[in-house]
Image (cartoon, rainbow, N blue to C red):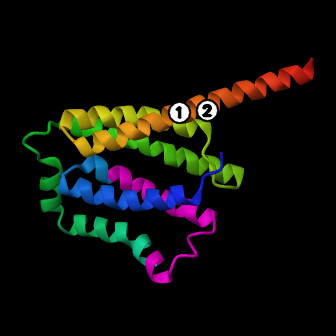
């Protein structure tokens, strides 16, 4: 399935907003997941030829924003560490679970990037939706435990879309297999 440009544009904007939300919630799991996938969004926009259509100032801003944020975190490491990892109400196992869930969710973009590079165009393969569903379930669980209604709502709506896309792909594969079998007979 080819990926629409709007998907990557909205993903990049959402990634920025989720990083900001993660910072306001003192949630390392949200921030790290978004920082990893951010540059995959840019790669997909480049592969579709829409990155170059942005104003140069906007491209520079979007490209360097995460680098500046990470630099700020590192320059203020003591405060950053305290803010993100020393929650009195959040046990270490939960932070680890949240990071693993976010990483699993982010793997979908790493897989998509790898698959698209092989295909020579930006596509959303079936496994993208399977990884999305698995990561989403983990993030929903994390969000429920953290009492995070924003993440619950965001991931729950995505969970429905990922399930639907898996079902569409499954039906399409069955139909294609059925047609191939009929042609062989």
Residue 38 counted in the magenta span: yes
Q: Is residue 15 left or right of residue 145?
A: right
**Residue drawn at 47 percent across, 43 percent down:** 107
**Residue drawn at 14 percent across, 55 percent down:** 83
| Rendered position, 8 above or below 171 | below
Q: Residues within 10 Å of mark 2 (few under 14, many from 20)?
A: few
Which of the pair 16/31 is nearer the observer? 16
Tag on residue 87? none
**Residue drawn at 38 percent across, 57 percent down:** 15
Q: Quadrant of residue 146?
A: top left
Residue that sits furthest to the left in the current view: 88
Residue that sits furthest to the top in the current view: 185
Residue 3 location in percent, x, y?
Answer: 60, 52
Quadrant in the picture for the C terminus: top right
Quadrant in the picture for the N terminus: top right
Which of the pair 51/37 is nearer the observer? 51
Does any portion of residue 104 appear in the rendered image?
no
Q: Is residue 45 left or right of residue 139?
A: right
**Which span of residues is magenta-colored?**
32-59
- Residue that label 1 marks: 164
Which secondary structure lies at badge 2? helix
- Residue that label 2 marks: 168
Which secondary structure lies at badge 1? helix
């Amino acid at each position: 399935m080819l990926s629409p440009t709007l998907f990557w544009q909205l993903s990049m904007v959402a990634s920025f907003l989720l990083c900001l939300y993660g910072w306001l919630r003192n949630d390392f799991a949200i921030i790290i997941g978004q920082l990893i996938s951010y540059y995959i969004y840019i790669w997909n926009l480049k592969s579709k030829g829409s990155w170059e259509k942005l104003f140069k100032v906007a491209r520079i801003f979007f490209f360097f924003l995460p680098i500046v944020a990470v630099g700020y975190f590192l320059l203020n490491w003591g405060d950053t560490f305290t803010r993100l990892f020393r929650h009195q109400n959040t046990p270490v196992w939960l932070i680890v679970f949240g990071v693993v869930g976010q990483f699993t969710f982010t793997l979908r973009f790493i897989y998509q990037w790898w698959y698209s590079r092989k295909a020579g165009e930006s596509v959303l393969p079936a496994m993208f939706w399977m990884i999305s569903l698995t990561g989403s379930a983990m993030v929903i669980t994390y969000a429920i435990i953290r009492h995070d209604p924003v993440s619950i709502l965001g991931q729950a709506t995505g969970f429905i879309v990922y399930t639907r896309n898996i079902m569409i792909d499954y039906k399409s594969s069955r139909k294609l297999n059925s047609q191939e079998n009929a042609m062989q007979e």
